Amino acid sequence: MNILIVDDHALFREGIKFLLARSAFVTKIVEAGSAEAGLAHAVVHDEIDLLLLDVNLPGYRGLDSLRLFRDKFPTSAIVLLSGVDDPVLIRDALANGASGFIHKSVTGDEMLAAIGKVFAGEPCCAVPDGFVAAPFQVPGALPAQLTPRQKEVLARLCEGLSNKEIGRDLNMSDNTVRVHVSGIFRILGARSRTEAAMLARRSGLVA
């Protein structure tokens, strides 16, 4: 998995990079200290699976930065990072395209667990003890629970492509494809590729 960290605090970025280096599912980590530098990666790196995005970047208010990055990285999962204790922010983040929320005071293990949920196709909310968060669940049908990248993988899976073929088509590693397929199976409740394709068509995820 390729991860882009966008946060204006260099020390915090370094801490996340050190933490993510412990994870087997991380392939590449790139970073940016501003929204402008982060957006530049939309051109340079077309294979960003996950953005860890500080909600309080200089020059942006509220969820403005989330909306901007959601537009520029349409196929990437975006998880907001914040030190602000605002439960409503979590709910509003989901409504505006976020895949998760991580409070900056959580432990390293809690952060890794939250990121792992996102890769498995589940919304995540990692907050400190005593923080009462608004429910961070996707209402409605299955399509809303799949990340944009998982939807791309699912579409090709339904065409009968193998993991290697999906990887070549989407410029992804075999391991990345396997993680996405596993997440798709979990969300759809499928036990095989054939069953996943059947459930996807029945749910309207693919034509």
Image: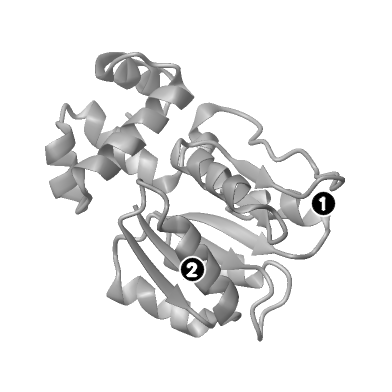
Q: Position of residue 47 (x, y in %)?
A: 30, 60
Query: Visible in this render: residue 70?
Result: no
Q: Position of residue 95 (x, y in %)?
A: 66, 50
Residue 192, quarter of the rendered image: top left
Q: Which residue: 41% across, 49% down?
A: 23
Give the camera-side residue of 52 and 171: 52
Q: Is residue 138 above or below residue 200?
A: below
Q: Which residue: 18% across, 35% down?
A: 163
Three-letter residue code for mark 1: Pro
- Classify the position of the C terminus by image quarter: top left
Q: Which residue: 38% across, 16% down?
A: 190
User: Given this view, does label 1 or label 2 mark the residue nearer the observer?
Assistant: 2
Looking at marks 1 and 2 on the same chain, the residue that comes earlier in the sequence is marked by 2
Residue on which disc 2 sits? 5
Give me the disc on residue 87: 1
Structural crowding at the residue carrying mark 2, measured as other residues with C-alpha within 10 Å and reported as few (<14), some (14–19) or many (≥20)? many
- Mark 1 falls on what kind of element? helix
Give the camera-side residue of 184 and 12: 12
Q: Which residue: 52% across, 47% down?
A: 115
Is 44 left or right of 97, judged from the image as shown? left
Give me the disc on residue 111: none
Give the camera-side residue of 61 and 49: 49
Is 191 left or right of 66, judged from the image as shown? left
- Mark 2 falls on what kind of element? strand
Residue 57, quarter of the rendered image: bottom right
Residue 194, quarter of the rendered image: top left
Task: Give how far apart the Cα atoms at labels 1 and 2 are.
Answer: 23 Å
Structural crowding at the residue carrying mark 1, measured as other residues with C-alpha within 10 Å and reported as few (<14), some (14–19) or many (≥20)? some
